[in-house]
Amino acid sequence: MQPFEMPSTSMENTLLPGDHFFVSRWPTEIRRGDVVAFRSPEEDRLFVVKRVVAIPGDKLHLRDGVLYLNDVRQDEPYVRHKLSDFNPYRDNFPAMPASESNGVSDQRWARSIPQYVQGDDLILPPNSYFGMGDSRDISYDSRYYGFFPRENVVGKLTFIYWSFNTPPEAYERSLEDRDRLAFVAHIIIHFFDETRWSRTFKVVK
């Protein structure tokens, strides 16, 4: 087991900023719907948490923000849509070309997408997984940086062992040396009134 902390809103409401959880490193099969931690394909030292929506051999596309997997519209009750705008690249992936203007900073991924597209679908090659955040409108995920290989997967999330009300901006400030002590002091002072007790030992699924 390895502890992690959720710093962003990309997995709401499955995970909230300030959720602390354990990841099981026990080797196991990765299935569709699993919430996993993995090393980012863009930055090896960065750990990312997303839901696996497609596995090797699957074909997928999004239409108007709805996921279609192997030609079947998916029922995803955990998905949240926070924005009311329509983004052609984000919501109709992979129909629109990938570019920096669409939020794709990794040009290797932008150039490689066409080789995996057949018709309307993106086809997953061997040893490749596609992850997306449950907060689908704001999640920076495989749509923007591509597949991640099995060897990048740290493990599956198990349960939340502690949850503290931590806005993302507070987490970002805590990474700065000058704000770290203030952040720790805030946790000590507000441990009881800002701990989300109802999320303690909640299983992640």
Image: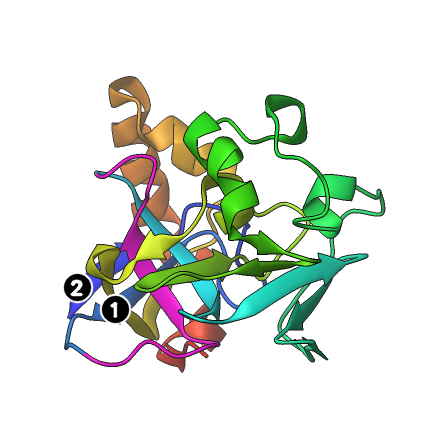
Q: Residue at x 45, y 46 (%)?
A: 146
Camera-nearest residue between 130 and 120: 120
* Mark 2 or mark 1, earlier in chain: 2
In the image: residue 177, left or right of residue 131: left
Q: Position of residue 23 (x, y in %)?
A: 25, 68
Q: Type of residue at label 1?
A: Phe
Say left or right for 28 vs 122: left
The verdict on residue 103 being magenta is no
Separation (CA) of disc 2 from disc 1: 5 Å
Residue 3 located left or right of residue 74: left
Which residue position holds label 1?
A: 22
Residue 4, relative to residue 44: is it above or below?
Answer: below
Decide: few, some or many residues near mark 2? Use Cα within 10 Å; few <14, some 14-19, many ≥20.
few
Residue 129 coordinates in the image, percent (x, y): 40, 62
Residue at 35 percent across and 79 percent down: it is 201
Q: Label 1, secondary structure: give it.
A: strand
Residue 170 can be seen, yes or no: yes
Which residue is painted at 55% across and 47% down in the image? 143
> Quarter of the image holding residue 156?
bottom left
Corner quadrant of residue 186: top left
Q: Is residue 26 above or below residue 125?
A: below
- Residue 128, image x, y percentages: 36, 60
Q: Which residues are magenta?
A: 28-44
**x%, y% of residue 164?**
41, 56
In which quadrant will I find the N terminus?
bottom left
Residue 35 is one of the magenta-drawn residues: yes
- What residue would you read off at disc 2? 2
Amino acid on which disc 2 is placed = Gln
Proximity of marks 2 and 1: CB atoms separated by less than 8 Å: yes
Q: Main secondary structure of the magenta part?
A: loop
